[in-house]
Image (cartoon, helix red, strand yellow):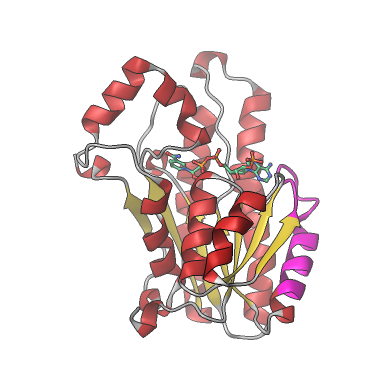
Amino acid sequence: MPAGFDLTGRTAIVTGANTGLGQAIAVALAQAGAGIVAVGRSSMDETRALVAPSGRPFHEVAADLSTLEPIARIVREAEAAAKADGSRLDILVNNAGIIRRADAIDFTEADWDAVMDVNLKSTFFLTQAVARTMLADGKGGKVINIASLLSFQGGIRIPSYTASKSGLAGLTRLLACEWAGKLINVNAIAPGYFVTNNTEALRADPERNAAILSRIPAGHWGKPEELGGAAVFLASDAAAYIHGVVLPVDGGWLAR
Ligand code: NAP
């Protein structure tokens, strides 16, 4: 691996690392050398087993990100874990996210708030808390937000999701502007259509499945492992001068 992409000795927090894209990102970061602090509300056993062959440290922080209540504890436990490994909090991947589907005309306040709370509010305040530690020792770090094609497009029947992911793209740019001069790179990845729990309903609907598939130039739904390289890149020194970018990893969807 070229030196610029090597993450050896660094520690990455990955939220929602138990499954799907977060799990694939945790595995890829570990394969590139990073220790992992996996944050989430479900068992991390599967991810722990997948990270194990890399031989990198793996820690769990149990937390439900639907409120801000666990934020201070997450950072405390993650810092302690990194310190125990002789490391620090170098990388934060804000991956945890939810989606609720209903026609805009019927959309409920509960579905609005639930999605905004996890996808945007907790993401911002966790980032703020982690960035304080990155700024405190002056060494900076990398923040990677998991955005969406709905950061660029409207979509249908997912009003709070589109609002949250469009908001996350804006937040990525704002934080990049504030922190680029302080050695923190803030960027985002916009996954296309990947095979995870998030897209189960779409793939189960034969009409929607065929429509989506026929529009992806690469000709297949994304496999979670196809996202890892972008995360490693943005977490690495190779991306030191990249700030505020929302990088599509979408099989060509947006190019169409
Ligand atoms: P997923 O399998 O549903 O994973 C979502 C992750 O977020 C899970 O680990 C989930 O934990 C976690 N999470 C949700 N609510 C949480 C909460 N309150 N507290 C802690 N963790 C919570 O879907 P995915 O596709 O991997 O999604 C990962 C990210 O990629 C999301 O931000 C999603 O919006 C984004 N994305 C996905 C696609 C796609 O095509 N799959 C496309 C664009 C963007 P549990 O398992 O415990 O629920």
**Range covered by the magenta-colored residues:** 62-81
Is residue 69 covered in magenta?
Answer: yes
Image position, residue 32 (x, y; %): 46, 72
Point 27% across, 37% down: residue? 220
Image quadrant in which the C terminus is located: top left
Q: Quadrant of residue 207?
A: top left
Q: Is residue 195 visible?
A: yes
Answer above or below: position of 172 versus 66.
below
Relative to 129, 6 lies left or right: left
Relative to 9, 76 lies left or right: right
Between residue 227 and residue 172, name the one nearer to us. Answer: 227
Image quadrant in which the N terminus is located: bottom left
Total marks in image: 0
Relative to 242, 30 lies left or right: right
Residue at far front of view: 53
Image position, residue 211 (x, y; %): 27, 23
Q: Quadrant of residue 213?
A: top left
Image position, residue 39 (x, y; %): 67, 55
Point 71% across, 59% down: residue? 60
Is residue 110 covered in magenta?
Answer: no
Point 20% across, 44% down: residue? 255
Q: Quadrant of ligand 1?
A: top right
Q: Is residue 92 visible?
A: no
Image position, residue 114 (x, y; %): 66, 33
Answer above or below: position of 65 versus 142.
above
Between residue 104 and residue 11, name the one nearer to us. Answer: 11
Point 59% across, 72% down: residue? 56
Relative to 182, 129 lies left or right: right
